[in-house]
Image: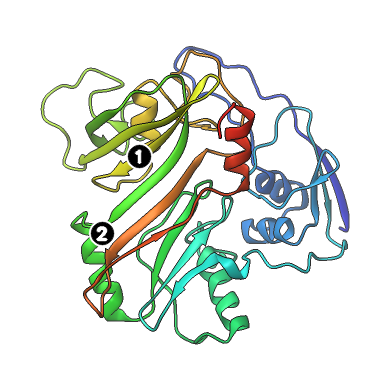
Amino acid sequence: MSRARSRIPKPPPVQHAEAKHAIEPTVAAVVRERIGCAWSRARELCAQGRVAVDGVRCLDPARRVGEGSQVVVDEQAPKLRAGPLAESAIVHADRDLVVVDKPAGMLSVPDEPGAKGTLADYARALLRSLGRAPDVPLDVVHRLDRDTSGLVVFARNAEAKRRLAAQFRAHDIDRVYEAIAHGEVAAARIETLLVPDRGDGLRGSFGHFRRARGDAPPQARRAVTHVEPIAALAGATHVECRLETGRQHQIRIHLAEHGHPLVGERVYVRDYAGPKIDAPRTMLHARTLGFVHPRSGARVTFRRDPPEDFRAMLAALGGA
């Protein structure tokens, strides 16, 4: 099949109050269903510039497509010459570790066995093209959500991985994010116990969705987020989030439960009753990453400002 079109159908209506909200499909999901390919192939077609949404080429497989949008897949279209990662994405590289500025829409780790097209795959290919020790593996130490942009560190040997992983477990890592959240956000320290299922099938804080009964379950994990407003926007706030701990979806959950879900949030926004601001992805960027270097023992800190799509959303909401 060389060219396929798909128009997104209207999602089915919610049948009762406790039914899960309909979530718009991603471009990759539409491509995969339309041509019957693997997830890795769907993402690859996007990266190659062979997928268009409403007549515009779409390189982001995680982009959500709404009702009535037209997705066109042309497997015979010329590939984009540019790779998924620019040379500038390599923030730092030495014999022990590599720090990469992850673009939004790229997986940190495979989402299914054998899947390719992850940040590690692309970073390894870029290092190979630059002649910077391409044969040394890149081992995952931590991860970012697919929609989140920003800094990720990979280990290049077993000892570096062990030392870095120990720092993450001890929460001895400097991790600062920038985000755009709905509403007027005030400075806050948010501490909760996060659980895999808060009572409605979503990750969340113990006792937030339903009244807590008895002790927290064994899988509950303490999570602390420090929130500081940077600037007021139209219907939103540009905020800085400093992690005292690092749990899955921590910032997204904490801000949503605090009454200020992130702009572009598709999952934890369901309880928000205020006006929602649309965005192509979750407006969250891992700006600062600091740790003790596994070989030298020196404290090192890396910073990358938010990418163009984040800055464009700030500008659209009246920010600097």
Q: Quadrant of residue 80?
A: bottom right
Distance between the alpha carbons at the discs numbered 1 and 2: 17 Å
Q: Earlier in the sequence, mark 1 or mark 2?
A: 2
Is 108 situated left or right of 311 in this image? left
> Which one is in front, 67 or 17?
67
Give the farthest residue toward the front: 320
Residue kind at label 2, given as amino acid type: Phe
In the image, residue 40 sits, relative to residue 267, either above or below, namely below
Residue 146 or residue 71, whichever sits in front: 146
Residue 196, horizontal then vertical, whole percent? 31, 39
Q: Nearer the viewer, residue 299 or 69?
A: 299
- Give residue 168's mark: 2
Q: Secondary structure at mark 1?
A: strand
Viewer-nearest of labels 1 and 2?
1
**Residue 144 horizontal/vertical position (percent):** 44, 52
On the image, the x and y values in percent for residue 229 come to 38, 30
- Given residues 212 and 292, the one toward you in this image is 292
Q: Is residue 172 visible?
A: yes
Image-quadrant location for residue 38: bottom right
Residue at 15% x, 21% y: name it: 213
**Neighbour tally class for label 1: few under 14, some 14-19, many 20 plus, Cα within 10 Å:** many
Circle 2 crowding by C-alpha within 10 Å: few under 14, some 14–19, many from 20: some
The residue under the point 63% across, 61% down is 40
* Quarter of the figure with residue 256: top left
Amino acid type, label 1: Cys
Q: Which mark is residue 241?
A: 1
Q: Quick one: quadrant of the N terminus? A: bottom right
- Total tally of numbered discs in the picture: 2
Residue 200 appears anywhere in the view: no
Say if mark 1 contacts mark 2, CB within 8 Å.
no
**Secondary element at image label 2:** helix
